[in-house]
Image: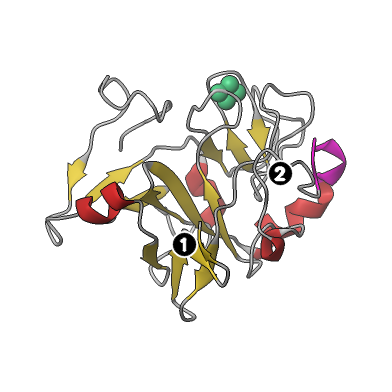
Amino acid sequence: MHIRFCWFRSNCNKCFSPQTDKIEPERRTWLIACGGAGAVAAAATAVPLLTSMAPSEKARSAGAPVEVDITDIPPGGVKTVEWRGKPVWVVRRTPEMLASLEKIEGQLADPKSDRTAYPVPEYAKNRHRSIKPEILVTVGICTHLGCSPVSKFETGNQPGLEANWQGGYFCPCHGSTFDHAGRVYANKPAPDNLEVPRHMYLSDTKIVIGKDEKGEA
Ligand code: FES
């Protein structure tokens, strides 16, 4: 399990170390450790927090849209893929995670995603910020100074998090917090919600990131 905080400092090796996927050598697999994440998946799955599969070097360098098979993401699980050099989280939210979105809306800075620094595609301009409620697609880079937030899916009171925490993401650099839809809490350093990139479903089990019905991002 490797921890990576700052997306832009990948060469320091203090918090990140890539691994090689033996099945598909051309792809890299990495893990981003997230404190307390496993709790969400309830007992059943001591789910790997974040399992990522990057596209080929060719696709990455070209900034091409990235196809993602979502069948292996368990409830409460997250798959991270690299798109245009950025980590994109694909999260399969549980009913409990979705239910939390309404409860904390009054504590958010931009609950309806009206701010325009990171315009939300029309199909994701809703409470769950996604096409299908259970599947969230969002860029895992803090909108303050670019650190990588970590998932804090365990609910309840915890140091550094809002009272009666309902789960979401925490940026360890300066303490910004985000809900399960990537919406930032008010009065935090991060000014905006996490970015939702253009994406679309190719089938019930496959999405593509970086492209939608209107074309490529
Ligand atoms: S970079 Fe996330 S709070 Fe500063």
Residue visible at 27% across and 47% down in the picture = 61
In the displayed orientation, state which residue is furthest to the front. Answer: 215
Place of residue 213 in the rendered image (x, y in percent of width and height, measured from the top left): 56, 72
Q: Which residue in the structure is indicated by mark 2?
A: 166
Q: Quadrant of residue 96?
A: bottom right
C-alpha span from label 1 to label 2: 20 Å
Place of residue 85 in the rendered image (x, y in percent of width and height, measured from the top left): 36, 41
Say whether disc 1 or disc 2 marks the residue closer to the N-terminus.
1
Does label 2 point to a residue whose CB lies under 8 Å from ligand 1?
A: no
Is residue 176 depicted above or below 1 in this figure? above
Residue visible at 66% across and 67% down in the picture = 133
Callout 1: SS: loop
Question: Mark 1 belongs to which amino acid?
Answer: Ala
Does label 1 point to a residue whose CB lies under 8 Å from ligand 1?
A: no
Question: Mark 2 belongs to which amino acid?
Answer: Gln
Callout 2: SS: loop
In the displayed orientation, state which residue is furthest to the bottom. Answer: 203
Q: What numbered label is drawn on residue 44? A: 1
Q: Quadrant of residue 4?
A: top left
Magenta residues, start to end? 104-111
Place of residue 159 in the rendered image (x, y in percent of width and height, measured from the top left): 64, 23
Q: Is 203 left, or right, of 125 in this rendering? A: left
Is residue 205 depicted above or below 24 in this figure? below
Main secondary structure along the magenta-highlighted residues: loop
Q: Is residue 56 visible in the rendered structure shown here?
A: no
Q: Is residue 208 magenta?
A: no
Q: What numbered label is drawn on residue 160? A: none
- Who is closer to the viewer here, 180 or 146? 146
Place of residue 80 in the rendered image (x, y in percent of width and height, measured from the top left): 40, 51
Q: Is 77 left, or right, of 214 in this rendering? A: left
